[in-house]
Image (tube, grey):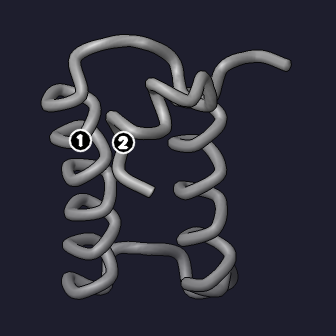
Amino acid sequence: MHLTSAQRAGEFKPGDARVMTLAAWALAHGLATLMLDDRLPRDIPAERLTRACATLLLDGMRRPA
């Protein structure tokens, strides 16, 4: 589902969809860069960090229940 569609459906908070999209991209890019540069702790699996970032992002964008 597209971000603006989710906003219209009431699933995501209202706001500037372009800014929200760029913020999500920045988060994903930052995580990817840290992974590629081998700058993350080795004791935390990459999948766990990826899921944590996705959860934080989506929790911030979703409307409260």
Q: Secondary structure at mark 2?
A: helix
Instruction: Residue 64: give its label.
Output: none
Image coordinates of residue 32 in percent, x first then y, are 28, 75
Q: Earlier in the sequence, mark 2 or mark 1?
A: 2
Provide residue 64's location: percent of width, then percent of height: 76, 16
> Residue 24: x and y, percent?
31, 46
The answer to whether the residues at label 2 and label 1 have Cβ atoms under 8 Å apart is yes
Give the residue pinned by disc 1.
Answer: 21
Number of residues whose C-alpha sits closer than 10 Å to that of mark 2, classed few (under 14), some (14–19) or many (20 or more): some
Decide if residue 45 is on the left or right side of residue 26: right
Q: Residue 59 sits in which quadrant?
A: top right
Point out residue 57 in the picture as x, y percentages from the top left corner: 51, 42
Direction from residue 44 to residue 61 in the image, left or right: left
Q: Secondary structure at mark 1?
A: helix
Residue type for callout 2: Leu
Q: In the image shown, does 32 or 11 lie closer to the viewer?
A: 11
Above or below: residue 57 compared with residue 12: below
- What's the CA distance linking mark 2 and mark 1? 8 Å
Q: In this view of the protein, which residue sits in the foreground, 27 or 13?
A: 13
Which residue, given by chain and number where applicable, does mark 2 sit on? Answer: 3
The picture quadrant where one finds residue 35 is bottom left
Q: Left of 6 or right of it: where is 51? A: right
Q: Look at 23% across and 87% down and name the residue there.
A: 36
Residue at horizontal 35 percent and vertical 51 percent from the top: 2
How many residues crowd around disc 1 within 10 Å: few (fewer than 14), some, or many (20 or more)? few
Q: Report the residue at 31% width, 51% height from top.
A: 27
